[in-house]
Image (cartoon, rainbow, N blue to C red):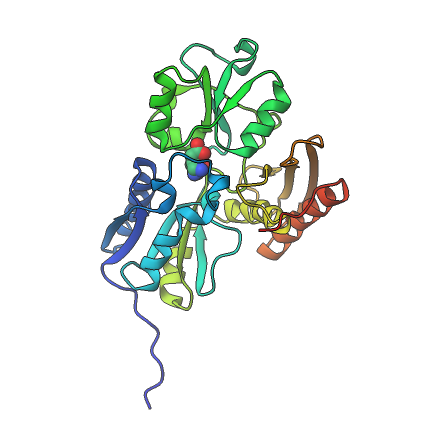
Amino acid sequence: MPISQPQPIPAPLVIATRESRLALWQAEFVQGLLQARGRAVQLLGMTTRGDQILDRTLSKVGGKGLFVKELEQALAEGRAHLAVHSLKDVPMELPEGFVLAAVLEREDPRDAFVSNDYATLDDLPPGAVVGTSSLRRQVLLQHLRPDLRIEPLRGNLDTRLRKLDEGQYAAIVLATAGLLRLKLQQRVRMVFPVAQMLPAAGQGALGIEVRSGQQALLALLQSLAHRPTWLATAAERAVSRTLGGSCSVPLAAHAQWSQPDGAQAGLLQLDAAWGDPSGRTALLQTCVTARVDDLAQAEQLGQRAARQLLEAGAVVAVP
Ligand SMILES: NCc1[nH]cc(CCC(=O)O)c1CC(=O)O
């Protein structure tokens, strides 16, 4: 019997990606990183259920998994070898047989205020209509400005901006990261401080998913990872995981290092907020800090924040 050989890295490597402009940008970004390491890389574009269903709020049609299932199917069938996702859209628990191979350096994690007529949230007239389909953004916006009317807004970035330009909304709120990546930064009127609009877990970061058990491929992809981002987002995602987070619960989690790029010597500060989906109780917020040197410590920090929210009255969501 021959001893088992390590699986070679496929050539070309195929990246499964959604076909929105942002998803393609992200896949091409990873393609470029891998090509710079001497790999041949192709893209496999696909449409997901999340891209097709545009008339309903995500929380009502099955949540985050919607954007990744078809890509996982391509991985399972060997039609692609890796999938590039916005980490924010990746479910807290991956299905059996899949792993997060790497998390890349984060773009600006904050939310952006986008409007043609108003420079800041404070400038909006009483009762103005603001577009967002994120329950997190809805709850945080109402917390800042109880008078505003929040209306659903779905679709990819270009669609959302078009709906703003058509005059359906006085303003919309989007992730700054997506706008920067598509060179739409001139659309940003104001970036919300995290203390005002706490970002979603993983916002602004990219995650690379693969089938488990491929050591050589995993090692290659881990060489692209950004450790400070990976640890910070692991803490954020642990908050969501512990609270059964999904699109149907307004949940925010954002971790930052006390020193820039200080993964070695650094303290990680994790802010988290939980909103009652029924809107009956006020927004709950917590902040915890710890030295974090590895993924296990990052997850412990996230669990600690989640426990504090639970003690304050948060309820674990049942899927
Ligand atoms: N939910 C859709 C989604 N997933 C990732 C981003 C933006 C980029 C990112 O957060 O990395 C967006 C758009 C938005 O929230 O405005």
Instruction: Judge by depth and name the residue closer to the eye, 58 or 99.
Output: 58
Instruction: Judge by depth and name the residue closer to the eye, 155 or 219.
Output: 155
Q: Is residue 269 left or right of residue 6?
A: right
265, above or below 5, in the image: above
300, above or below 122, in the image: below
- Figure disc tally: 0
Residue reaching furthest to the right: 311
Which picture quadrant has residue 175? top left
Q: Position of residue 269 (x, y in %)?
A: 65, 39
Q: Is residue 175 left or right of residue 142?
A: left
Quarter of the picture containing the N terminus is: bottom left
Which picture quadrant has residue 294? bottom right
Residue reaching furthest to the bottom: 1
Q: Is residue 233 left or right of residue 287?
A: left
Q: Position of residue 65 (x, y in %)?
A: 45, 49
Which picture quadrant has residue 273? top right
Residue at 74 percent across and 44 percent down: it is 308
- Ligand number 1: quarter of image: top left
Q: Position of residue 56 (x, y in %)?
A: 43, 36
Q: Is residue 310 left or right of residue 226?
A: right
Q: Is residue 8 visible from the viewing direction of this image?
A: yes
Residue at 35 percent across and 24 percent down: it is 184
Q: Position of residue 186 (x, y in %)?
A: 37, 19
Residue at 42 percent across and 47 percent down: it is 66
